[in-house]
Image: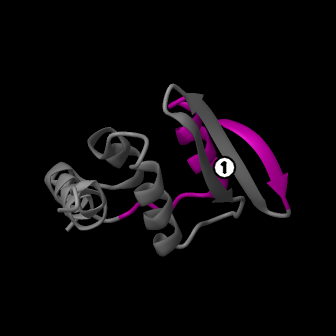
């Protein structure tokens, strides 16, 4: 199973800047990053801590995966080579669980 890298808030901000996100605002130790696309505003909140917990990194990865392909994003957040299949499986599972039920038409 691939392991998450231990990233700092600043490292996550630099990663997201590569994908067009910009620092929008800051309140305390949390930084809001935003990018505007044809689909609308895309906002992520990043804690500006020296080292983020793995659960926090995983949550940021999942939120960012709504806007950025998980197969591209995973090389910045995970270690190892076998992670692409696992990440795509998690993405597909979330798609089926959360997104598809909202798209089904009612009879």
| Quadrant placement of the C terminus | bottom left
Where residue 26 appears, as percent x and y from the top left, is 82, 52
> Which quadrant holds residue 27?
bottom right
**Is 39 positioned to the left or the right of 8 in the image?**
left
| Magenta span includes 23 | yes
| Quadrant placement of the N terminus | bottom left
**Is 97 positioned to the left or the right of 20 in the image?**
left
Disc 1, SS: helix
> Colour scheme used in the picture?
one colour
Identify the residue at horizontal 41%, vertical 53% (top origin): 77
Where residue 40 appears, as percent x and y from the top left, is 56, 34
Identify the residue at horizontal 22%, vertical 61% (top origin): 106
Identify the residue at horizontal 39%, vertical 49% (top origin): 65
Where residue 59 appears, as percent x and y from the top left, is 47, 66
Comparing 10 with 71, the one in front is: 71
Answer whether residue 30 is visible to the viewer in this image: yes
Give the residue at the far top of this rendering. 38
> Which quadrant holds residue 71?
top left
| Magenta span includes 12 | yes
Where residue 57 appears, as percent x and y from the top left, is 49, 63
Write down the residue under mark 1: 10
Residue range highlighted in magenta: 4-27
Identify the residue at horizontal 62%, vertical 66% (top origin): 51
Comparing 98 with 31, the one in front is: 98
């Amino acid at each position: 199973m691939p392991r998450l890298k231990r990233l700092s808030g600043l490292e996550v901000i630099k990663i997201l800047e590569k994908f067009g996100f910009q620092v929008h605002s800051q309140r305390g130790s949390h930084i809001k990053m935003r990018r505007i696309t044809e689909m609308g505003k895309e906002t992520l909140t990043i804690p500006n801590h020296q080292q983020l917990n793995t659960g926090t990194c995983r949550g940021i990865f999942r939120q960012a995966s709504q806007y950025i392909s998980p197969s591209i994003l995973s090389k910045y957040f995970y270690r190892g080579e076998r992670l692409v299949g696992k990440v795509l499986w998690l993405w597909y599972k979330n798609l089926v669980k959360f997104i598809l039920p909202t798209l089904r038409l009612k009879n």
